[in-house]
Amino acid sequence: MKIDCNTPLKDLFQIAKGIIYEIQEDEEFIVKDLFRGYEWSRIDVGNRAKLGAMFFNFSKNDDKLIIVGIGKTAHNQQKYRKLHDDDTTTNNK
C-alpha cells in the first residue's frame, strides 16, 4: 500500500501491526521504525501522534502480549520490545 498524507489512520495502524511480525524476538523499536523513513515523513504530525497513542493502547490491551512498552527515548517516544510471535498466526491448526 502506498502511504501518503491521505492514508487513513486505521490503515496506518494495520500496517504497523503487520510489521511487528518482521521484528525479531527481544528486539526493541519505536513506532517510527515500523515505516520506511520517507513513508514516515509523509504521515502528518497529528496522525503520527494519534498512531503512537493507538499503538500504545494496543500494547497495553493485547491479550496475547506480543509487545510490551519499555519506557521512553530521549525524544519522548515510547519504546517497545517484542516478546514473541502470535502463535495463532504462525501455527494454523
Image (cartoon, helix red, strand yellow):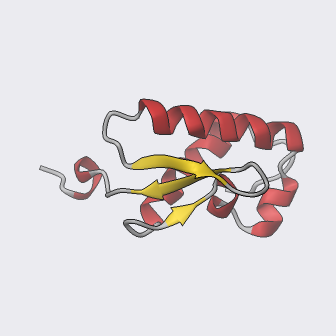
* Residue found at x 69% / y 56%: 73
42 left or right of 3 in image: right
The number of numbered discs placed on residues in the rendered structure image is: 0
87 left or right of 75 in image: left
- Vertical arrangement, residue 53 with respect to residue 71, above or below: above
- Vertical arrangement, residue 57 with respect to residue 67, above or below: above
Quarter holding residue 30: bottom right
x and y percentages locating residue 16 in the rendered image: 58, 51
* Residue found at x 74% / y 34%: 50
User: Looking at this rendering, what residue extends furthest in the left direction?
Assistant: 93
Q: Nearer the viewer, residue 71 or 20?
A: 71
Q: Nearer the viewer, residue 17 or 68?
A: 68
- Vertical arrangement, residue 88 with respect to residue 33, above or below: above
x and y percentages locating residue 48 in the rendered image: 78, 43
* Residue found at x 66% / y 34%: 53
- Vertical arrangement, residue 31 with respect to residue 62, above or below: below
* Residue found at x 36% / y 56%: 83
Quadrant showing the N terminus: bottom right
x and y percentages locating residue 64 in the rendered image: 31, 40
